[in-house]
Amino acid sequence: MPKFQVSRSVTIKAPADELYAIVRDFRSWPTWSPWLTAEPDCPLDYAEDGLSYSWDGQIIGAGENRVVEEQPPHALHLQVSFIRPWKSQSPVRFLFEPTAEGTKVTWEMDGSLPFFLFWMKAMMRGWIGMDYQRGLTMLKDLAETGEVPSSIEFLGEQSFPGLDYVGLRTRCSMDDVGTAMEKDFATLNQWLETSGTQPASAPFSAYHKWDFSRGETDYTIGYPVSQTPADLPPGGITGKLPAGRAYVVKHTGPYRHLGNPWSAGFMRGQAKVFRQNKKAVPFEIYENDPRHTPENELVTLLYFPVK
């Protein structure tokens, strides 16, 4: 069977024993698990001895997470068994290493795929790696602040009127996408100030491609305009997001958690909750300005075009 390994780490300002206790308590997982947040009403069954829990969802599939070895506060060894979408078992480890800044938490998995899915090995490594990073980011917020400021609402299918825009198109690594988008928005905002152009509505980002094998993304950010201006920002482009229908997911919280609604939306598409139009690009619209809005109150609407 094709085998692969995934490992992601984050440094958290908390002692190792405290972080170990959070991860060891399976009843805390719905707060920070990158999969359970995608299906908040997924049925969970906790073992009386606290050594395992199982899930049986319509969106995230079914399986079991079980403790196989405890080494508090240094390491916790688990076995994840999947029943759906296919059967498999994978050893998983959480490692807790004290540092000058707190504790370095590492989440690792040794995975395998059915032989007929050998071609998905690089993509699975990328998908699960992003999931692990999302989970660790939520664990960091939970441990440092006592909560995870990431709320998801599924608004269902809605009509989108379409828009014309001025923007910038960028290809970069997934790890650098946040920094790249900040730079692009700074360029656009400076252009707005100097050109006197007034946006017709809130800014957006459209994602042309996520290349999980290479760890790269290709996106366009832009401001809607009522008419195309004579002068464009450096490297600027014009374009149109076409009118149509889309499945809409609302996220409230910091932009660092936007992977949560994106993952939840794509998983709903795969589960046939809606018929995703893969020929049209998905996009997100930023409902308020991060320069003047507390990050926990930021609202982002994600649009998944449907057939």
Image (spheres, rainbow, N blue to C red):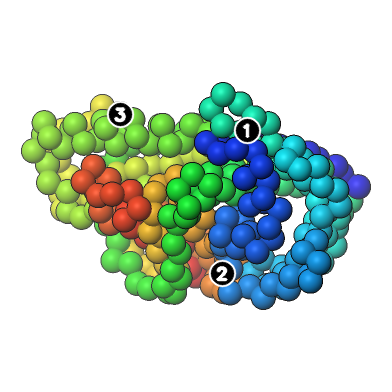
How far from the left and from the top, in percent, is residue 105? 65, 37
> Of circles 1 and 2, which is in front?
1
- The answer to whether residue 125 is seen in the rendering is no
Please state which of residues 56 and 154 is positioned toward the viewer in this rendering: 56
Q: Secondary structure at mark 2?
A: loop
* Residue for badge 1: 104
- Counting residues from the start of the chain, the first of labels 2 and 3 encountered is 2
Q: Secondary structure at mark 1?
A: strand
Is the residue marked by circle 1 packed among few (<14), some (14-19), or many (20+) residues within 10 Å?
Answer: many
Where residue 217 is drawn, which disc sits there?
A: none
Mark 2: amino acid? Pro
Mark 3: amino acid? Gly
- Counting residues from the start of the chain, the first of labels 1 and 2 encountered is 2
Up the image or down, 105 lies above or below 235; here it is: below
How far from the left and from the top, in percent, is residue 55? 72, 69
* Residue drawn at (28%, 49%) of the image: 294
Where residue 40 is drawn, which disc sits there?
A: 2
How far from the left and from the top, in percent, is residue 83? 82, 66
Q: CA distance from mark 1 to mark 2?
A: 28 Å
Q: Quadrant of residue 93?
A: top right
